[in-house]
Amino acid sequence: MAATLVAHGVAVGALISHDEISMTQVFPIISSSKPSARRCGGLFLALTFAANGCFATESPFKLPIRPQMQINLGASHLTVEGRLDAPVGRAIAWAVLTDHDGFARFVPGLQVSQVIEDHGNEKVVAQRGEITAGPRLRFDGNVQVTEIPGEGMRLVFLSGLFKDSEGEWQLSGDRPVTLKYRLRMDMRKSPLPPPLASTLAEQQVRQWLSALASEMERRQANRK
């Protein structure tokens, strides 16, 4: 069985690498409601990446800041939380956190980030790019953002790889600012098998925290 999956994985991986096929076309089996099908799909996915070397190389972005991480995978939901302290002022932290149109300049793998609907503290942001840590997966979706001025913001992923997931950013303190990010996925709706979903979610939370904290420190240093 494994040999068959690897053989198919090589063919599918070739299509992925040439942008000829979408996630829903390649991996319909991992969206199945049957546990056995999802397990098989997860194995197929892992073997596909392994057979084709479809794992990201080191990002050109330097992210030395390492967050504290916590992962909780339950029967129906996956929650990933990360936090770190950034030696910056609260105003700079808030400016970076809400720089939706500028994220692509300092978040690894993010190619486009653009506010497409703006109703004050309520926004919809379109984002497109590629996950740069772990398996290379393209993402393209919209995120509904509710800003809580000076304190954080809530996210609802309307489409894309993390569709139906929810996120929350929190700011507390001042010099240093404690930055927290929580991502919660409904595994009953996710197209990803639990092991892969857990890996991708942890990588994304870690990467976004590190990227935003690094940008906060850069802007703080430029003020001196």
Image: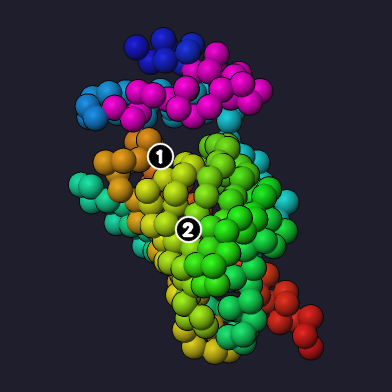
> Which residue is pictured at 68% across the width and 48% down the height?
111
Residue beneath label 1, please?
Answer: 196
Q: Is residue 14 magenta?
A: yes
Q: Do the residues labelled 2 and 1 touch (CB within 8 Å)?
A: no
Q: What is the quadrant of the C terminus in the image?
A: bottom right
Q: Give the range drawn in magenta.
A: 9-32
Residue beneath label 2, please?
Answer: 144
> To which quarter of the image does residue 130 belong?
top right
- Residue 209 visible? The answer is no
Q: Which residue lies furthest to the front in this view?
A: 119
Q: Of discs 2 and 1, which sits in the foreground?
A: 2
Is 3 on the left-hand or right-hand side of 187?
A: right
- Predominant secondary structure in magenta? helix
Three-letter amino acid code at the position of disc 1: Leu
The correct choice, above or below, for 169 with respect to 188 in the image is below
Is 125 on the left-hand or right-hand side of 43?
A: right
> Which residue is pictured at 49% across the width and 11% down the height?
7
How crowded is the residue under tag 1: few (<14 C-alpha within 10 Å), some, or many (20+)? some
Is 12 on the left-hand or right-hand side of 61?
A: left
> To which quarter of the image does residue 87 belong?
bottom right
> Which residue is pictured at 31% across the width and 52% down the height?
78
> Where is residue 106 drawn, in percent x and y?
69, 60
Three-letter amino acid code at the position of disc 2: Gln
How crowded is the residue under tag 2: few (<14 C-alpha within 10 Å), some, or many (20+)? many
The colour scheme of the drawn protein is: rainbow
